[in-house]
Image: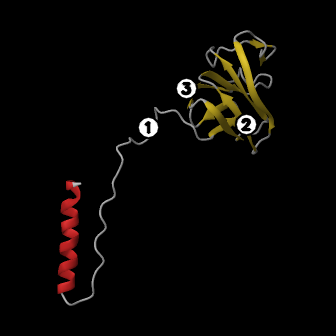
Amino acid sequence: MLRNAPIALGAVAMITLAACSGGSTPAPAPAPAETSAAPAPSEAEPHSAPVAATEADFSITLDSSDLVAGETTFNVTNDGPSTHEFVILETDAAPDALPVKDGIVDEGDPSIKANLGEVEDVTAGSSKDLTAALEAGKYVVICNLPGHYEAGMYAGITAS
């Protein structure tokens, strides 16, 4: 409380001087706001807001790959000229090392723990949302149309 004493005394002095000056009374200066010691969010902290996912020919870019475990919505936008899909797979495999069979990722392979959902037919220039419940772990998002994963349409995610 003593740290605010100089501010209070200064405000009282300003009011007293203004009252004695014979002019109009100016409003007292506001006291500085108290601030919390909580640090500002950093890039290393997990992301919990909706995740922007941009698909193009042939890539997937996420605005964050470190996410907070829990219900997460992906706002998927197709900036490419081709139709794509967006699939969330739980796996410990590296994003570029998923099992491929006949040009698509073999989602039945034992290295794929689960398919958490997908949106199909994301046409050029359109957007679709996909909400999934992410537990702490590793995930890969892919476009699993023939040849698209092998062309580079994947991104890794970690949820904690």
Say which of 84 and 93 sits in front.
Answer: 93
Establish if 158 lies above or below 106.
Answer: below
Dot 3: within a 10 Å radius of its alpha carbon, few (fewer than 14), some, or many (20 or more) residues?
some
Q: Quadrant of the C terminus?
A: top right
Three-letter code for the amino acid on which mark 2 is drawn: Leu
Which residue reaches farthest front?
A: 1
Q: Position of residue 53 (x, y in %)?
A: 65, 37
Q: CA distance from mark 2 to mark 3?
A: 19 Å
User: What residue sits 76% from the left and 39% below the top?
Assistant: 81
Instruction: Give the mark toward the camera: 2 or 3.
Output: 3
**Residue nearest the viewer, comparing 133 with 81:** 133
For the residues labelled 1 and 3, the Cα–Cα distance comes to 15 Å
Which of the 4 image quadrants contains residue 102?
top right
Question: Which residue has dot 2 on it?
Answer: 130
Q: Considering the numbered disc 1 on the image, is that residue within a helix, a strand or a loop?
A: loop
**Residue type at tag 3:** Ser
Please give the label number shown on residue 160. Answer: 3
Mark identifier at residue 42:
1
Q: Is residue 83 above or below residue 157?
A: below
> Which of 80/96 is in front?
96
Picture coordinates of residue 104 (x, y %)? 78, 18
Please report contact status of discs 1 and 3: CB closer than 8 Å, yes or no: no
